[in-house]
Amino acid sequence: MNTKNPQKERIFPFVFPWRGAYNERKPALELLKSKGFTLIYLAIIWTIVGVLGFASTRNCEESWQVALQCEYAFWVKNFTESPLIFFRNLFTTPILHNGLDHILFVSVLGFLLIVQSHEAVFGSKKTALIFMSAYFTVAPFFGLFYTVGLDLFPNSEFMQFAFVRNWLGGSLGMFQVYGALATKSRKPWIMLSGPVVFEIFNLTVLGIDLHISLMHLMATFLGYWISLKFVKG
């Protein structure tokens, strides 16, 4: 077996989903155990879609299935109106997705590339904690940011827009795990520049909401800092 650590030899320290931390072959049962968080998360989100269909960010009256998922999504307005629901939904919004492109993005790029690579290196528990920590740091920060921002700038369309839709999906946690994985890169600054370029493309070409890009980028750099300071692997 190759005993060198490829994470410090490569700029992008990803591993194949069917391999271990050093891209080595592992027995099937051991491999499944080492990717437990990835497998459980993917099973949950695809089961939800299979049972309830896709969620919606705005049209919450389409059906009872959509209304139910809207009830458990992240709404900025709940930060002050319903703090307990705001807190509860930090647990549920990562498993809700609003379209096939959304869930495929999180499943393929997010989990089959990024998250399972981190999990192979750091373990399931640390990966799950870093993933979920995005929703208990970045999401509340922006809940506060937009709430205060709307009070200060009540006519700002940018601030108003944060309240007219919900925000959901696993991409926030995915970006935080990506940032954490960058601590294993030979050149972290190159790896960290990836999401910056990606979000510029999203904003200028795909026309994604700036609010989403800001959350993704904060999660990326926060994940890097958290892993650098507090996580060993």
Image (spheres, helix red, strand yellow):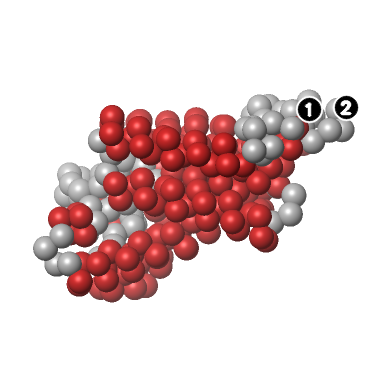
From the viewer's perspective, is 198 left or right of 133? left
Category of crowding for the residue at label 1, using alpha-carbon neighbours closer than 10 angstroms: few (below 14), some (14–19), many (at least 20): few
- Three-letter residue code for mark 1: Glu
Q: Is residue 105 above or below residue 155?
A: above
Q: Helix, strand, or loop for circle 1? A: loop
- Which x, y percent locates residue 65? 27, 46
Foreground residue among 194 and 83: 194
Q: Which residue is mark 1?
A: 24
Quadrant for the N terminus in the image: top right
* Residue for point 47% across, 63% down: 136
From the viewer's perspective, is 220 left or right of 65? right
Callout 2–callout 1 Cβ contact below 8 Å? yes
- Three-letter residue code for mark 2: Met
Foreground residue among 112 and 9: 9
- Which x, y percent locates residue 182? 61, 43
Mark 1 or mark 2, which is nearer the start of the sequence?
A: 2
Residue 78 visible in the displayed image = no
Q: Is residue 110 above or below residue 70?
A: above
* Residue for point 29% across, 46% down: 210
Residue 227, picture quadrant: bottom right
Category of crowding for the residue at label 2, using alpha-carbon neighbours closer than 10 angstroms: few (below 14), some (14–19), many (at least 20): few
Q: Is residue 49 above or below residue 140?
A: above
- Which x, y percent locates residue 208? 28, 39
Foreground residue among 151 and 30: 151
Number of numbered discs on residues: 2
Residue 197, picture quadrant: top left
Q: Helix, strand, or loop for circle 2? A: loop
Foreground residue among 65 and 125: 125
* Residue for point 50% across, 30% down: 108
Q: Which labelled disc corresponds to residue 1?
A: 2
Residue 143 visible in the displayed image = yes
- Which x, y percent locates residue 193? 50, 39
